[in-house]
């Protein structure tokens, strides 16, 4: 198997023209598209319909090429989107393709590893299970399934796990109550936080970062010493199950791409950005050159404002601002910091990092081609 990665632009949240052009020109085949991770210019909240608009447009376009219904693709192609392109962040989407190769071309035992992609979908999650142990364990099981699909046996070879989890709208909460069930919280925004937290701890269990015995519903949004430094969790009304994308390196895959990650201790941890670039032999002195930048196929960042209201002993006001949501603050701040090193605003920066790295911290993951390889970033 070979992984192909394309970072493509969008003129608006329903614009799939760049991917459509790649398929029509024969660069890739529609059936090779296995997952999409992207940034839309929505607000990132419960009512951010740009995510659903993009997903609907993607499935509609692919179904035309594959002669199938859009609904049939919804349970086979994860489309995980984060709303909010504040500051210098640019709306874009990263398309992951899997190309089968002849057995004669398979990588020999002992060969270098290459980017591997694994996918899984949990069962439909009832509203009363969102943000609770049932969700934690479903995510853990789905991550293990995705690792198996990616031919990644060692959890240490996993560098980034993107999960999209359901949210509970008022209507879904009422439906659950009509069945005699209660939900984790009445505020949809609070539910989003619980859902992200449950997803993160599920990843941590699957990767061996936490023992399942140490995880309970009581620690959700409470004990932030428990976390995964490779999980990136989003929550939205556009899904009713947990969609999982596991990215790592495996000898079972061929191709020029590899992925690396680094944990970020806080929102000012620019050293982690330089470290992950160094892991992929991408020198930034102090910024990537235009030629080196061409090797970068995807950049993924997760963080959120420190709940203690401090960054390195200095007070921040992100949590007290009633004009601008705290998540929009952190996306703009991290986007600017990382983009200044890359020299590029095409970065997936997602807030809502409950149990995803230490409080106020997060992670950065980068996919890059080998030296001399130029990924088709923003190809048309």
Image (cartoon, rainbow, N blue to C red):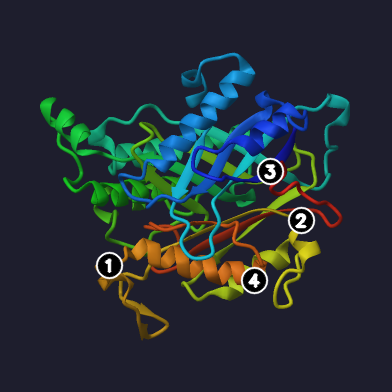
Mark 4 residue crowding within 10 angstroms, few (<14) / some (14–19) / many (20+): some
Instruction: Give whichever of discs 1 and 4 has the lower sequence position.
Output: 1
Residue at 40% of width from left, 50% of height from top?
201
The x, y position of residue 148, in whole percent, is: 60, 33
Instruction: Give whichever of discs 3 and 4 has the lower sequence position.
Output: 3
**Marks 4/2: CA distance?**
14 Å
Residue denoted by label 4: 341
**Marks 2/3: CA distance?**
11 Å
**Marks 3/4: CA distance?**
21 Å
**Residue 80 visible within the image:** yes
Residue at 50% of width from left, 31% of height from top?
57
Instruction: Give whichever of discs 2 and 1 has the lower sequence position.
Output: 2
The x, y position of residue 286, in whole percent, is: 70, 78
The x, y position of residue 333, in whole percent, is: 47, 70
Left or right: residue 253 compared with residue 271: right
Q: Secondary structure at mark 1?
A: loop
Residue denoted by label 3: 6
Residue denoted by label 1: 323
Left or right: residue 179 compared with residue 215: left
Residue denoted by label 2: 295
């Amino acid at each position: 198997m070979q992984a192909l990665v394309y970072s493509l632009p969008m003129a608006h949240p329903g614009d799939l023209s760049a991917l459509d052009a790649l398929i029509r020109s024969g660069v890739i085949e529609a059936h090779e598209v296995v997952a999409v991770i992207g940034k839309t210019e929505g607000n990132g909240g419960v009512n951010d319909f740009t995510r659903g608009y993009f997903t609907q447009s993607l499935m509609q376009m692919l179904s035309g090429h594959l002669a199938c219904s859009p609904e049939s693709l919804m349970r086979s192609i994860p489309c995980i989107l984060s709303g909010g392109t504040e500051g210098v962040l640019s709306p874009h989407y990263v398309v992951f393709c899997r190309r089968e190769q002849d057995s004669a071309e398979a990588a020999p035992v002992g060969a270098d590893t290459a980017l591997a992609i694994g996918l899984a979908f949990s069962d439909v999650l009832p509203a009363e299970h969102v943000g609770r142990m049932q969700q934690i364990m479903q995510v853990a099981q789905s991550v293990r399934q995705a690792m198996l699909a990616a031919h990644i046996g060692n959890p240490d070879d996993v560098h980034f796990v993107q999960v999209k989890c359901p949210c509970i709208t008022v209507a879904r909460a009422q439906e659950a109550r009509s069945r005699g069930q209660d939900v984790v919280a009445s505020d949809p925004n609070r539910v989003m936080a619980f859902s992200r937290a449950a997803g993160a701890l599920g990843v941590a269990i699957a990767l061996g970062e936490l023992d399942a015995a140490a995880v309970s519903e009581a620690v959700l949004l409470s004990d932030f010493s428990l976390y995964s430094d490779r999980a990136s969790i989003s929550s939205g009304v556009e899904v009713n199950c947990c969609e999982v994308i596991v990215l790592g390196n495996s000898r079972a895959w061929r191709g020029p791409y590899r992925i690396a990650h680094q944990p970020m201790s806080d929102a000012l941890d620019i050293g982690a950005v330089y470290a992950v670039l160094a892991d992929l032999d991408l020198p930034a002195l102090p910024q990537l050159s235009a030629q080196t930048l061409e090797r970068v196929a995807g950049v993924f960042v997760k963080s959120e404002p420190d709940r203690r209201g401090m960054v390195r002993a200095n007070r921040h006001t992100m949590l007290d601002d009633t004009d601008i949501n705290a998540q929009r603050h952190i996306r703009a701040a991290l986007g600017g910091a990382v983009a200044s090193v890359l020299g590029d605003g095409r970065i997936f920066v997602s807030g809502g990092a409950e149990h995803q790295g230490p409080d106020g911290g997060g992670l950065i993951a980068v996919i890059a081609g080998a030296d001399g390889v130029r990924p088709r970033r923003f190809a048309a």
